[in-house]
Image (tube, grey):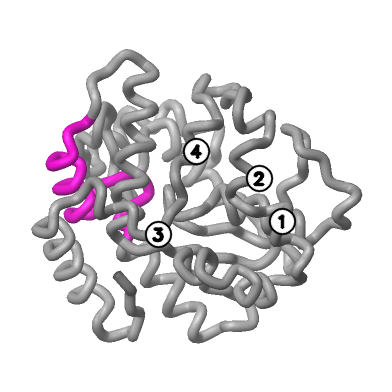
């Protein structure tokens, strides 16, 4: 199916795909993952038409797992420091897949705060945490299930470590110098610190041209363990149980 034929085929396609309500929108399950109707055409078109080059890099972290931070790190490594600008025109070069993963609890809490910033900006009520938590545990969220996404890249990074670099958010925060040496050089430390990125003018006052969503909402605390200020122990225990069942065999462990 060519991309140009997608509009005429979507009314039938959406009726056939599994559908769930997530926050204030509907998600459709295609090939095991959940997409909003606005994202699904692009995902299908990419599957059909995209041809990768050997020199390409893909940042494949899930939502709210430190993606914005790693987006700053990658071009800083790949370009001379003096050639980069702190504005909307900075190039984002991505060469070889990089997967960044924080703890499950911090991921969920960060995603929940991000979604509520988005929905309240558009005049909707905040999404209750218990509903968001249940949806996350079932794997029903944009581009989820989270566990399946992470596990697929973890397994592939073991098979092809020369092609896939698997990073943990906690390790980046605890010892960024050691982790960045795996990527490139020490000079990126200052340029890509969360504090500096948070204070850039474009991030303090800019907005997404499509959504009208302010960039400042992409940055919250960025601290490891912030889930403790939002989640109950019962929620953590449930998420830990799901994670243990999903990740037990491949040897992918999480810290607290």
Which residue bears the numbered disc 2?
A: 196
Q: Along the horizontal axis of the image, is 213 left or right of 37?
A: right
4 or 2: tag closer to the N-terminus: 2
Which residue bears the numbered disc 1?
A: 190
Which residue bears the numbered disc 4?
A: 218
Residue at point 35%, 54% (across, down): 107
Q: Classify residue 239 by image quadrant.
A: bottom left
Q: Are the two marked residues, 2 and 1, in contact with CB atoms closer than 8 angstroms?
A: yes
- Crowd class of label 2 (few under 14; some 14 to 19; many from 20; radius 10 Å): few
Q: Position of residue 241 (x, y in %)?
A: 14, 70
2 or 1: tag closer to the N-terminus: 1
Q: Which residues are magenta?
A: 127-146
User: What is the secondary structure assignment of the residue under circle 1?
Assistant: helix
User: What is the secondary structure assignment of the residue under circle 4?
Assistant: helix
Residue 48 seen: yes
The nearer-to-camera label among 1 and 4 is: 1
């Amino acid at each position: 199916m060519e991309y140009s034929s997608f509009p005429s085929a979507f009314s039938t396609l959406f009726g056939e795909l599994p559908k769930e309500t997530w926050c204030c929108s509907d998600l459709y399950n295609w090939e095991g993952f959940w997409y909003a109707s606005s994202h699904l055409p692009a995902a299908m078109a990419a599957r059909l038409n995209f041809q990768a080059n050997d020199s390409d890099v893909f940042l494949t972290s899930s939502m709210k797992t430190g993606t914005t931070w790693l987006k700053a790190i990658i071009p800083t490594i790949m370009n001379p420091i003096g050639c980069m600008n702190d504005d909307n025109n900075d190039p984002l070069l991505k060469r070889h897949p990089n997967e960044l993963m924080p703890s499950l609890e911090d991921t969920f809490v960060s995603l929940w705060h991000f979604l509520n910033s988005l929905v309240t900006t558009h005049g909707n009520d905040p999404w209750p945490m218990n509903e968001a938590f249940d949806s996350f545990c079932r794997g029903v969220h944009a581009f989820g299930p989270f566990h399946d996404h992470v596990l697929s890249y973890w397994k592939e990074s073991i098979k092809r470590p020369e092609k896939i670099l698997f990073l943990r958010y906690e390790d980046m925060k605890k010892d960024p110098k050691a982790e960045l040496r795996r990527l490139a050089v020490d000079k990126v430390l200052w340029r890509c610190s969360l504090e500096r990125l948070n204070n850039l003018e474009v991030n303090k006052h800019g907005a997404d041209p499509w959504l009208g969503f302010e960039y400042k909402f992409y940055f919250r605390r960025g601290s490891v363990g912030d889930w403790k200020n939002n989640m109950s122990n019962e929620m953590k225990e449930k998420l830990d149980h799901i994670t243990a069942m999903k990740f037990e065999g491949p040897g992918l462990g999480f810290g607290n």
